[in-house]
Image (spheres, grey):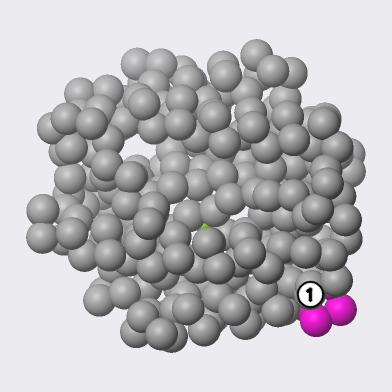
Amino acid sequence: MTWDRDISLKNPAEIAIMREAGRINATVHATIRELLKPGVSTADLDAAAEEVLKKHGAVSPFKGYGHPPFPNSITTSINNELVHGIPSPQRKLKEGDIISIDCGTFFEDYVADSAFTAGVGEISAKAQKLLDVTEQSLFVGIAQMRAGNRTGDISAAIQQFVESHGYHVTREYTGHGVGHTMHEGPQVPNYGKAGTGILLRAGMVIALEPMVLVGTHRTKVGPDKWTVVSADGSLTAHFEHSVAVTEGEPLLLTVL
Ligand code: MG
Ligand code: MG
């Protein structure tokens, strides 16, 4: 992947700005979590996100991204939709749904990127287990984000953890470096081999994002050219944090 040639190391001042961007992104998440109720539309969630970003002098790097240009500030992906769902006034949340919210913040020339999946009202035990395993897999990956490790150590840890619970990790979509733009190197897949890949160094910032599917690792892209769904219609979940590699513990940027 060409992304691996695009790795930038951030100095402490840059990481401090990215921490602010991450805090704004976490504020968007907290605002959306409060709104996850039956009857709320995914466009309502997008509007709420935009309001928070605007209040903090930030914008979303998602809006206008890619081809065709992504039309909104967040992605909203429900149940079998893994990532990149487009918000819509017609798409209303229902009791028992699980919804993944991915949001980016572009603030003072730096990007923060994070995602979570949560239930609407009461959800099934099966859905709750998927959310728990996916979120835990993110932290299993983050624990490997230490200077001197390699990207493959992160990938392998996530894959092993997810597969040990009988679930699948996506192959087509990966974690990535983040900085002035949303996608830089290194690319960090959710599957791989320990001891391989790019050497981690202090100052790297990586948006790590396990995307987990219950029935298959295979996905399809919907007719809107954005929404990615599980190939077999099974449930999916997605958690993401932007995290800095330091000389010591990994530093979570996308938290309050
Ligand atoms: Mg994201
Ligand atoms: Mg990302």
| Residue 89 among those drawn in magenta | yes
- Residue at 79% across, 37% down: 127
The image quadrant of residue 113 is bottom left
Tally of numbered tags: 1
Read off the residue under disc 1.
41
Estimate the x, y position of residue 75 in percent, counting from the top left: 64, 65
The one of 56 and 220 positioned closer to us in this rendering = 56
The image quadrant of residue 67 is bottom right
| Residue 197 visible within the image | no
* Above or below: residue 110 compared with residue 177: below
Estimate the x, y position of residue 222 in percent, counting from the top left: 81, 61
**Magenta-drawn segment:** 87-91
- 187 vs 243, left or right, is right
Q: Is most of the magenta stretch helix, strand or loop?
A: loop
| Residue 42 visible within the image | yes
Going by the numbered disc 1, the residue's amino acid type is: Ser
- Residue at 50% across, 68% down: 28
- 186 vs 122, left or right, is left
